Amino acid sequence: MAKIISEDIDHVLFTEEQIEQRCKELAQEIEKDYEERHIQPLVVGLLKGSVPFMAELIKYFKHPIEIDFISVSSYQGTQSGDVRINKDLDLSSRDKNVLIVEDIVDTGRTLKEVKQLFYNKGAKDVKVVALLDKPDRRLVNIKADFLGFTIPDEFVVGYGLDYNQCYRNLPYIGVLKNEIYNQ
Ligand code: 5GP
């Protein structure tokens, strides 16, 4: 019989309803910030983990935005902004106000490098919205400008987040049963 992925979850941290509610609030917060600065964002999702979060978030924007996606792998111990681009943007980010959409900020390395990458590409302004933040794990000094939820140092899956490319399609965020890691 095929596996049912929800059976692998030990406990739920955030339900679909809680995430939707937070996305509504975040979209309002973000729009207010951009409106006050009289600018429009180019909303860029970091593939693949940001996809469900970005899809939910942008539904609540009332003003025009552009969207695009990028997929990167970061090298360790190299210059900041020096990331390998697996899939680049379709649109130009030159002179744009880029809003990076990230699933989770952990050590902060990815975000720091991707932010620098966009400045290197000529973006005028680069801000970050992250669904989750694990501040206890931070290794570089960076934080999201807009944040969904702060979580403790636990490995989470669902709502875009994977374990071995599985569980991204769960409509909530949860913690896996210990036995899943020992299989
Ligand atoms: P950082 O560069 O901040 O250390 O890593 C960010 C990336 O690590 C995230 O985009 C995500 O792909 C992965 N990551 C960090 N923590 C978790 C977690 O708790 N669960 C999952 N599924 N991925 C995580």
Image (spheres, rainbow, N blue to C red):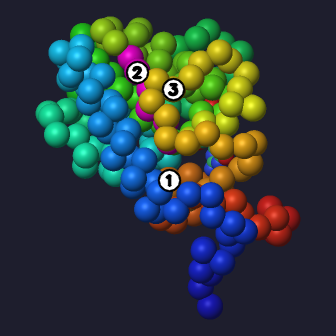
Residue neighbourhood size for the residue with mark 1, other residues' Cα within 10 Å, grouped as few (<14), some (14–19), many (≥20): many
Q: Does label 1 or label 3 sit earlier along the sequence?
A: 3
Q: State whether the magenta stretch is mostly helix, strand or loop.
A: strand
- Count every numbered label the image shows and give the total: 3
Report if residue 130 lies within the magenta region.
yes
First to last magenta residue range: 126-131
Relative vertical location of residue 97 with respect to residue 18 in this rendering, above or below: above
Residue for point 39% across, 55% down: 20
Q: Which residue is mark 3?
A: 144
**Residue 169 appears in the picture as rendered:** no
Tag 3 secondary structure = loop
Q: Quadrant of the N terminus?
A: bottom right
Q: Quadrant of the C terminus?
A: bottom right
Q: Which residue is mark 2?
A: 127
Rendered location of residue 134, percent (x, y): 67, 36
* CA–CA distance in space, label 1 to label 3: 18 Å
Residue for point 27% across, 27% down: 32
Q: Does label 2 or label 1 sit earlier along the sequence?
A: 2
Rendered location of residue 119, percent (x, y): 40, 10
- Residue type of the residue flagged with mark 1: Gly
Residue for point 40% across, 29% down: 100
Residue for point 32% across, 30% down: 30
* CA–CA distance in space, label 2 to label 1: 20 Å
Relative vertical location of residue 55 with respect to residue 145 in this rendering, above or below: below
Rendered location of residue 64, percent (x, y): 14, 33
- Residue type of the residue flagged with mark 3: Ala
Rendered location of residue 130, percent (x, y): 49, 36
* CA–CA distance in space, label 3 to label 2: 7 Å
Residue neighbourhood size for the residue with mark 2, other residues' Cα within 10 Å, grouped as few (<14), some (14–19), many (≥20): some
**Mark identifier at residue 160:** 1
